[in-house]
Image (cartoon, rainbow, N blue to C red):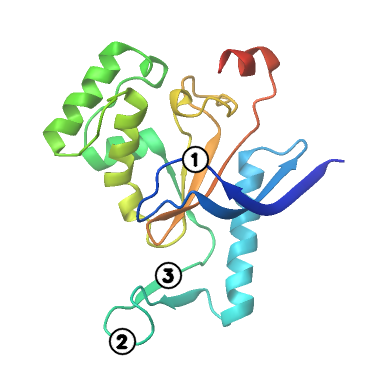
Amino acid sequence: MSRVFEIGKQFRNEGIDMTHNPEFTTCEFYWAYADYHDSMDMTEDMLSKMVFAIHGTYKIPYHPNGKQDKENVIEIDFSPPFKRIPMMKGLAEELKMEMPANDKLDTEESRIFFDKLCKDKGVDCANPRTTSRLIDKLVGHYLESKCKDPCFIIDTPTIMSPLAKWHRSEKGLSERFELFCNYHELINAYTELNDPKIQLSSF
């Protein structure tokens, strides 16, 4: 079968906070011969059309404190196309500084760079202060915080995405995206890693 999907309950033995619940419902699917561009296009098309079919408009009000609170209303715009932000380029633009080369992100020099950057910018990161965790905290502070309307953050470093396929043209990155909306992650997907030797070495 070229396409399979499952909608079901998940439970992951992970931490819980204001934005992460270890018990949730997902739709997971595999689509033969498709890549992350196809997944993004399908996601964008499905969500925008679903919102328009329900509301008759792409722009909808969100009431974070309930509809009784008339003062705090956030308008979320699902108009396609959704913005796409390459992760490391986006960080470089927001911080107005050059990042380490993508194919050098696994070095100790890069870890020291991001450790110092987080300290200088006042971005908290608990131990262990690995490069992956440091970049993730910076992305949360500088990129995810801009994603009120649906937005794809794409091209995640390989060191943060061990099961995603390597990027076809940018060494050190992977073909992965996360969709954010109202500053929260909704979707995490990637081009499937289909080289068994590399997949085995990822564990």
Question: Which residue, given by chain and number where applicable, does mark 3 sit on?
Answer: 76
From the viewer's perspective, tell me whether residue 159 is left or right of residue 133.
Answer: right
Q: Looking at the picture, how far across and down is residue 34, in whole percent?
A: 72, 39
Q: Quadrant of the C terminus?
A: top right
Residue behind mark 1: 13
Q: Tell us which disc is closer to us: 2 or 3.
A: 2
Q: Position of residue 199 (x, y in %)?
A: 63, 19
Give coordinates of residue 112: x percent, y percent.
Answer: 22, 18
| Residue shown at the point (27%, 25%) measured from the top left | 129
Q: Residue furthest right?
A: 1
Say what amino acid the circle numbered 3 marks: Ile
Q: CA distance from mark 3 to mark 1?
A: 32 Å
In the rendering, at what x and y percent does residue 189 appear?
A: 58, 42
Numbered marks: total: 3
Which label belongs to residue 26? Answer: none
Q: Amino acid at mark 2?
A: Lys
Position of 25 relative to 157 (above/below) = below
Task: Return the disc, 3 or 1, that comes first in the chain's sequence.
Answer: 1
Residues marked 2 and 3 touching at CB (< 8 Å)? no
Residue visible at 52% across and 73% down in the picture: 58
Secondary structure category for the residue under label 1: loop
To which quarter of the image does residue 66 belong?
bottom left
Indicate the quadrant where residue 101 lies: top left
Residue 129 vs 66, above or below: the answer is above
Residues at discs 1 and 2 in contact (Cβ within 8 Å):
no
Q: Residues within 10 Å of mark 1 (few under 14, many from 20)?
A: few
Within 10 angstroms of label 2, few (less than 14), some, or many (20 or more) residues? few
Q: Secondary structure at mark 3?
A: strand
Q: Which residue is mark 2?
A: 70
| Amino acid beneath label 1 | Asn
